[in-house]
């Protein structure tokens, strides 16, 4: 009897010692220890169905007007570059909405700076999206009213500057290769935690290196494998369309109620442009692609052949290209910034967003010297803050932080070891619950980060 009791006590002590040893191992192993413990409790099949969270960070900066120092300070503050001006944004998408040139002296330095960032970002899965502004086009057309003497001298004279901005010059070629006129950026690029949408590519990681060189080698092969010539085409990651100019755009961007039902991510995107997209332009078929196609055609005509006379469009510009340059065109439109009737303006903004299939309209062009301005409850965001020392405005940039987190209705039941049991393997087509969160924030040098918009919802997505 005494032997049995003693044996029982020894076994209990052994269990306690084993438990203490396991806890010590977990503590010393940190996350790696936890991961090893999870692998010991979950089979390989179960682990394949444990969903992972998704995070997308988009940063936007407005007009820079020849001021490298202020551009660098702003991007350091929002943690896209470090003190050595090297990219630290990882998979961040950085959008610059145009007007790099004029009013300052750092045109050459700014273009080299952004090309370096473009290369560094691509190496780690990030992306630099560059838009043309009205001042880039003015320079392309020979309108140098706002060019400074110091800027001309940095090129070694007017002749060298004109040559650099021609179709055979390094800036002109850069414009044609890497700059677009508007961009529709989808938040959930490369999210692979569901099988909800026939429009989403499930293997886009290889496309996150180079939007131009990588197109033919990687992205187009994936696209052709997934879509027929007549299939609906949604943004499929870092991809340029058949016109080679349409970045992050859909050939038919309008989002219908049926598409929202079939694709819960329809419209989960933001529109970026220099001036503003008037509802009349947004309503055009394939609006984003059409704007970019016309813009690049006008740009190529402007920097090729004989230089245009100051203040004039190329003589061979088409009526559609001329309309792009008018007051309601995407490079010049200021209605979303200046119209005082908030109700009427927000109604126009809603119309534009419906046509483009986006949540937010983000633009530069019209300076907001006190800082980034939000209208229509954060649906219209004006990001030109007069960063250049020529204006003396706020050094501010915009951040959109989008996350998808696996959600659960209640804690899982505990197993014999006192830990939660793994989730059951979902059946084909079974819905999984996700928490979607979008935070839109302003990062201003010398000030606290300010949240200007927030959107949260719960999604029920079919498991893969």
Image (cartoon, rainbow, N blue to C red):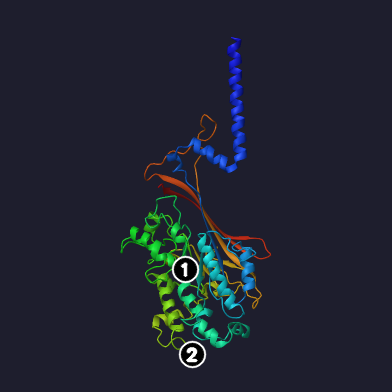
Q: Secondary structure at mark 2?
A: loop
Q: Is residue 297 above or below residue 354?
A: below
- The spot of residue 190 in percent (x, y) is 45, 56
Does the rendering let one see residue 415?
A: yes
Outermost residue to the bottom? 309
Q: Nearer the viewer, residue 148 or 61?
A: 148
Q: Nearer the viewer, residue 320 or 233?
A: 233
Q: Quadrant of residue 9?
A: top right
- The spot of residue 372 in percent (x, y) is 60, 68
Q: Is residue 412 above or below residue 332?
A: above
For the image, the number of numbered tags is 2
Q: Nearer the viewer, residue 148 or 152?
A: 152
Q: Residues within 10 Å of mark 1 (few under 14, many from 20)?
A: many
State the mark number for residue 309: 2
Query: Left or right: where does residue 455 sit relative to residue 370?
Result: left
Question: The N terminus appears in which quarter of the rendering?
Answer: top right
Q: Earlier in the sequence, mark 1 or mark 2?
A: 1
Q: Residues within 10 Å of mark 2 (few under 14, many from 20)?
A: few
In whole angstroms, how far apart are the C-alphas of marks 1 and 2? Answer: 30 Å
Q: Secondary structure at mark 1?
A: strand
State the mark number for residue 183: 1
């Amino acid at each position: 009897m005494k032997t049995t009791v003693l044996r029982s006590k020894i076994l209990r002590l052994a269990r306690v010692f084993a438990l203490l040893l396991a806890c010590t191992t977990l503590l010393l192993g940190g996350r790696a220890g936890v991961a090893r413990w999870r692998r010991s409790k979950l089979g390989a099949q179960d682990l394949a169905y444990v969903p992972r969270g998704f995070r997308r960070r988009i940063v936007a900066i407005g007009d820079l007007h020849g001021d490298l120092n202020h551009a660098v300070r702003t991007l350091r503050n929002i943690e896209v570059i470090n003190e050595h001006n090297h990219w630290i944004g990882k998979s961040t998408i950085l959008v610059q909405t145009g007007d790099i040139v004029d009013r300052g002296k750092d045109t050459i330095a700014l273009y080299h700076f952004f090309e370096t960032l473009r290369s560094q970002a691509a190496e780690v899965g990030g992306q630099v999206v560059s838009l043309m502004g009205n001042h880039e086009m003015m320079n392309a057309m020979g309108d140098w009213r706002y060019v400074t003497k110091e800027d001309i001298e940095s090129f070694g004279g007017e002749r060298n500057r004109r040559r650099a901005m021609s179709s055979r010059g390094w800036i002109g070629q850069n414009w044609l290769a890497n700059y677009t006129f508007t961009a529709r950026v989808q938040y959930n690029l490369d999210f692979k935690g569901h099988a909800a949408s026939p429009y989403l590519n499930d293997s886009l990681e290889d496309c996150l290196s180079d939007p131009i060189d990588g197109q033919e080698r990687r992205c187009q092969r994936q696209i052709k494998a997934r879509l027929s010539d007549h299939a609906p085409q949604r943004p499929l990651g870092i991809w340029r369309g058949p016109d080679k100019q349409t970045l992050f755009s859909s050939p038919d961007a309008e989002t219908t109620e049926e598409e929202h039902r079939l694709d819960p991510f329809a419209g989960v995107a933001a529109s970026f442009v220099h001036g503003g997209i008037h509802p009349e332009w947004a309503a055009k078929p394939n609006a984003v692609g059409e704007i970019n196609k016309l813009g690049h055609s006008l740009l190529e005509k402007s920097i090729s052949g004989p230089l245009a006379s100051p203040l004039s469009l190329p003589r061979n510009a088409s009526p559609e290209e001329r309309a792009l340059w008018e007051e309601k065109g995407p490079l010049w439109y200021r209605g979303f910034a200046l119209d005082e009737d908030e109700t009427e303006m927000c109604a126009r903004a809603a119309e534009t967003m419906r046509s483009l299939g986006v949540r937010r309209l983000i633009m530069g062009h019209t300076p907001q010297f006190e800082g980034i301005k939000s209208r229509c409850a954060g649906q219209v965001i004006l990001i030109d803050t007069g960063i250049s020392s020529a204006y003396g405005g706020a050094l501010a940039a915009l951040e959109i932080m989008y996350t998808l987190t696996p959600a659960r209705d209640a804690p899982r039941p505990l197993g014999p070891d006192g830990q939660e049991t793994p989730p059951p393997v979902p059946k084909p087509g079974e819905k999984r619950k996700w928490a979607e969160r979008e935070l839109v924030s302003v990062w201003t040098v010398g000030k606290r980060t300010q949240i200007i918009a927030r959107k949260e919802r719960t999604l029920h997505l079919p498991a893969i």
